[in-house]
Amino acid sequence: MRPASLDTCLLLLGSLWIAHPSRAQEHAFNSKVDVEMGERVFLSECGRCHGPDAKGNDETDAPDLTRGRFKSATTDAGLFQVIRDGIPGTAMIGIGWAPETTVWQIVAYLKSLNVDPGDYVLPGSADRGRDLFYDKGNCIACHMVRGEGGRLGPDLSTVANRRKPEELKADLTHPDETVEPRWWTVKVTRPDGSVVEGLRMNEDTFTVRLMDARENLWHFSKGEVRSIERIETSTMPSAERTLTPGEVDDLVAYLFSLRKESGT
């Protein structure tokens, strides 16, 4: 048996390490994928109080987290600790069950929301971009903005809260670069040879659920179909196929202007 003093020292050292996340950890999770994963966990675990757009909730007295200023944390490490441990005596409970990687990804997501539109001078016209979104580009067919539009692609109402202009342009021109599993598609061949294809809404060992281009939902048992093919590329074509470089800039300007319109 080890001396009690040694056990105490080991426990103290462990608690000090937990209370003060290292700067090496702090900067290890700041990629585009980390931000997207952080957003996903935030929506499921934090959005109920802070709102799906992280702008706070008067009913729960949860603060706006999009301004880059946090009452109980002045550093990334401090924000990490608040997210993980919560704030005693308040409704803010931590997610201590989550791996440290996940907590850092939430930190990365919250930091991505603090983008000042005034920091950017964009070459495109937001007004022309809006027309493209609803007309020539027909983005509204698949994407929703403020409750209007399709569900075959991500809701873009607050996309500028988490994406910089250069990232928005890359999303438009190289949509296959990073495709989240939520937006993969599935092609199911039924026993009679007919094919149903659509967004992969849910999948487990025995079943798959998808939504087709008409937004109809389908549910299949894997043992009762001829084949299932998963397609991990984007359903969105590159904007370079249909828009000029200037029009792409206009569309980026419109998408980024959504942040201004939201008042953040």
Image (spheres, grey):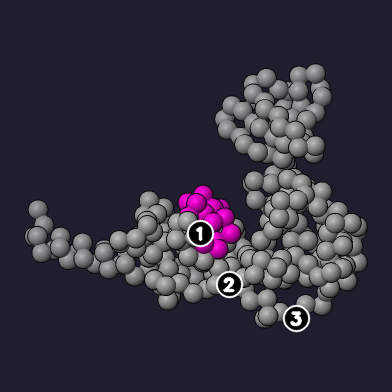
Give the structural element (helix, strand or loop) at label 2: loop
Snapshot quadrant of residue 250: bottom right
List the residue tagged with mark 1: 57
Q: Is residue 194 above or below residue 16?
A: above
Q: Earlier in the sequence, mark 2 or mark 1?
A: 1
Q: CA distance from mark 2 to mark 1?
A: 18 Å
Q: CA distance from mark 2 to mark 3?
A: 17 Å
Q: Earlier in the sequence, mark 2 or mark 3?
A: 2
Circle 1: residue type? Asn
Is residue 194 left or right of 261 when viewed as pictured?
A: right
Q: CA distance from mark 3 to mark 1?
A: 32 Å
Q: Residues within 10 Å of mark 2 (few under 14, many from 20)?
A: some
Give the structural element (helix, strand or loop) at label 3: loop
Quarter of the image for the C terminus: give it. Answer: bottom right
List the residue tagged with mark 2: 114
Give the structural element (helix, strand or loop) at label 1: loop
Q: Residues within 10 Å of mark 3 (few under 14, many from 20)?
A: few
Find the magenta span and give its range.
40-57
Based on the picture, tell me whether residue 158 belongs to the magenta stretch: no
List the residue tagged with mark 3: 121
Circle 2: residue type? Asn
Based on the picture, tell me whether residue 41 belongs to the magenta stretch: yes
